[in-house]
Image: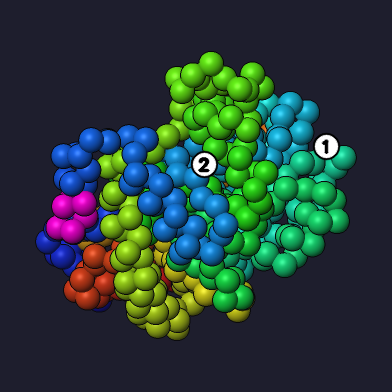
Amino acid sequence: MERLAIEGGYPVRGGKIYYGRQWIGEDDIRAVEEVLRSDYITCGPKVDEFEQELARYTGAKYAVAVSNGTAALHCACLAAGIGPGDEVITTPLTFAASANCALYCGARPVFADVDPHTYNIDPASVRAHITNKTKAIVAVDFTGQAVRHEELRAICDEFGLVFIEDAAHAIATKYKGQQVGSLADLTCFSFHPVKTITGGEGGAVTTNDEALYRKLVLAHTHGITHDEAQMQDAPHEGPWCYEQISLGYNYRMTDFQAALLVSQLHKVEHFAARRKQIVSAYNKAFADMPELILQQEIPESDTCRHLYIIRLALDKLTCTRRQFFDAMSAENIQCQVHYVPVYWFPYYQALGYEKGLCPVAEEIYQGIMSIPLYPKMTDQDVEDTIHAVKKVVEAYRK
Ligand SMILES: Cc1ncc(COP(=O)(O)O)c(C=O)c1O
């Protein structure tokens, strides 16, 4: 048996690799440079171009580019008319923003439990949490796998709920052959550097509904319109006139972010193909290891994974998750954990949420860890990661 680096052995590799990172090429740099040399660095043509290209790519009628994924979720909630007294059902196994967006609007996030095999929100649990205050569902495509659209759509139709999809992880994923972004009432994307494409920061909301689109446009730019058809005091006095007709925010994307995103979007299928290759290599390497539980996929989802999660079968290992994590780190494979259940955070505890609300999600959380997955990984990086996982499992096998 190989001696673990954490116990004085040699690490599987020299330099550290991380669970995720961007891939910026010379073409991306040129695209940004061009904008920086142009007349518009914000509110210019590149933002329009990105919105059009994203709409085309996702198959949605409309796309609104915003400053980040959190802003996208906030705008989606505003467009959905979520307000004080409303409840919004979401998953605890997500980044805090998926729930915070309800709080921003004065609504209460309600946590439904997840499926024990896919880790995505369980439609049966969603149904069990519906009350007469429920206004919307924020369903997260966790790790990139599409949620159960058919079941969630049926629930939304039955109870008159708005279906918001948090697709921060899922830009290149399809559900039953249809691109994520064209399925829910409102789909939110994030373009943070660990995501499949990046603008440094960035986000977007897509929709097929014109009324929702108009609300999104207002929400992301102060509630201000220049459109005479929407103005109350039309005909206006002169071309300088605009009106604030609702309360919005400055969530605009800059043109240099948009230029980077147009350039990255052109490569999204290439990035997705490489991610899929790496996921296949991991699945194959770990398939026969009873110490690891692998995330399962529904056949409807053609998934571009943003994260690859291994779940430790802790009853088959002599270590804790923390010891496994530290041992991987010593091998120079820096993992991460996605996610601490949102309602465990002190802020949510102070709001009255108690541990134990979603036992399946909490159980999953105890054993999970995200190992490196990003398209720029070389075959050697992938091999090293597999080597490290196997080495650590072997050292701690019962
Ligand atoms: C599931 C999920 N939703 C929302 C967000 C928020 O996106 P951003 O960081 O772009 O604000 C993230 C980002 O990590 C996320 O993972």
Numbered range of the magenta stretch: 26-31
Identity of the residue drawn at 52% across and 29% down: 226
Near-viewer residue (86 or 240):
240
Identity of the residue drawn at 32% across and 64% down: 266
Image height of 370 relative to 291, above or below: above
Identity of the residue drawn at 61% across and 75% down: 176
Q: Position of residue 24 (x, y in %)?
A: 21, 56
Q: Of helix, strand and loop, which one carries label 1?
A: loop
Provide the residue designation for mark 1.
Answer: 133
Mark 2 / mark 1, whichever is N-terminal: 2
Residue type (three-letter) at the residue carrying disc 2: Ala
Does residue 30 appear in this view? yes
Q: Point out which mark residue 72 bears.
A: 2
Image height of 85 relative to 313, above or below: above
Q: Position of residue 96 (x, y in %)?
A: 53, 39
Near-viewer residue (245 or 281):
245
State the predominant SS element of the stretch in magenta: helix
Mark 1 residue crowding within 10 angstroms, few (<14) / some (14–19) / many (20+): few
In the image, is residue 8 part of the stretch drawn in magenta?
Answer: no
Q: Is mark 2 within 8 Å of ligand 1?
A: yes
